[in-house]
Amino acid sequence: MKKTTITVIGVGLIGGSIALSMRRDPNIRVVGYDLRQDCLDKALTLGVIHAGTTDLQTAVREANVIFLASPVEQIVATIRSLVEMELQPGVIITDVGSTKAGIVKQAVDVIPDHVTFIGGHPMAGSHKSGVEAASDRLMENAYYVLTPAPGTPEEKVKQLSELLTLTRAKVVQMDAASHDQVVGAVSHFPHILASALVNLVAGYEEENAWHATLAAGGFRDITRIASSNPQMWRDILLQNRDPILKIAKDWANALEDVVHLVEQGDPEGIEHFFKTAREFRDSLPERKTGALPPLNDLYIDIPDNPGEIGRITTLLGARDINITNLQIRETREDVYGVLRITFHSQQELEKGEEVLRFFDYNVYKRT
C-alpha cells in the first residue's frame, strides 16, 4: 500500500504533537519543515518525524496533506509561497491558527483549483513549548474545529476529519466568523482581562508591596494565562480585531452595570450578579478541554516534616504518573503547608488523586 505523506510546517509543540499522532498509522510518512535545522534534528532524535528539511519545496512536493503549524502572522504568507510550488493534485492544506476568518478568506483567494484549504484550530495547548514538549496525547478529548469555506468539497472535509481521528480529538465544524466570535469570548478576551488585572496590581504594588506577597496564592492561579507569549497574543488580537472590539464593548457595559449596583448599594442586584455567574459556570463541563487549557492541578495538605515531598513524588513515580510541576504554597500560617502538583494530563491527575487518597493525604481540586 502506498503511504500517505503528511507534511508539518513548524515542528513545535502543536506541529510536533500532530506529527506524533499521525505516526500512529504505519501507512503515514511524516515530513517536518522548519527554518531551524536544530529543531528538525531534535524532532528526528525524538522520533516525532520520519524526515525533516529546511527547504519548503522539498518538504511539500510529495505531501497529500500539509499542516501549517507556524505562528498566526506567518500562515497566510506561507500559503502564498506554497501555491507557487509544485504540489500533489488534490492536496489539502490546513492550519492550526486560533483565528480563522482572515486566514480562510485570504487562503481561498489565492489557492488554485487543484488545492483545497480547510481552516483548523486544535483547542489544546501546554504551559511548555517546543518539540520536546510535543505529545501524541496533547489533543486527546480536546475540540478540533474545522472551518471549511463555502463550496469546499465535502469529501475533502471528510478526508481531513478522518485523518484527525488519529489525534483522538473531537472534530467539529463551524463557519470561520462564528469560530472567531466564540473563541474571542472564551479564550482571547480572557487573556486581555488576566493581563489587565496583573498590570493593575503591578501598579498598586509600587505603592504597597503587600500586593505581590498576597497575590502568590489564588491570584496567581486565576491570572495564569497572563504568562503567555506576548508576541503571539499581539498577533492574535490584531487578527481577531473586530470580535475582540465587540466583546470589549460588551464587557465594558457589563462592568458598568456592576459598578452601578455597588454605587446604589443594591444587595439583591449584586447577589443576582454573582448567582447567575455561579450557575452558568457550574454548568460548564468539568472534564472537557475547551479553548483554554485546563488546570490539571491537585492540592495536597502536607505536614512540615522532612522528606514529605519526596515521599509524595516517590509514590507517584512508582506508578509511572507523569507530573510537570511542583509548587509549595506560602500563604498558610498553620503547621500544614499546601503542595500544588501539576499533572501532564487529566488522566494522570485522576490516577495521582487515587494514589494519594489511598495513602491518606488530604487532596482537593480547585473547581
Image (tube, helix red, strand yellow):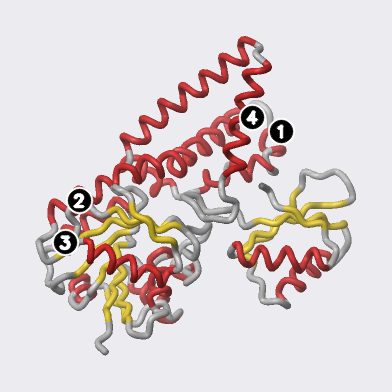
Q: Nearer the viewer, residue 366 or 36?
A: 366
Q: Nearer the viewer, residue 318 or 274?
A: 274
Position of residue 202 relative to residue 163, above or below, is above
Which residue is tagged 2? 150
Which mark is nearer the camera, 2 or 3? 2
The residue type indicated by label 1 comes to: Trp
Answer yes or no: do the residues labelled 3 and 4 have beta carbons within 8 Å?
A: no
The label on residue 100 is none
Determine crowd level at label 4: few under 14, some 14-19, many 20+ residues with C-alpha closer than 10 A. few
Which residue is tagged 4? 275
Q: Percent from the top left, x then y, of residue 198?
A: 56, 36
Q: CA distance from mark 3 to mark 4?
A: 52 Å
The label on residue 210 is 1
Determine crowd level at label 1: few under 14, some 14-19, many 20+ residues with C-alpha closer than 10 A. few
Determine crowd level at label 2: few under 14, some 14-19, many 20+ residues with C-alpha closer than 10 A. few
Q: CA distance from mark 1 to mark 2?
A: 55 Å
Mark 3: secondary structure = helix
Residue located 29% across and 50% down the image: 73
Mark 1: secondary structure = helix
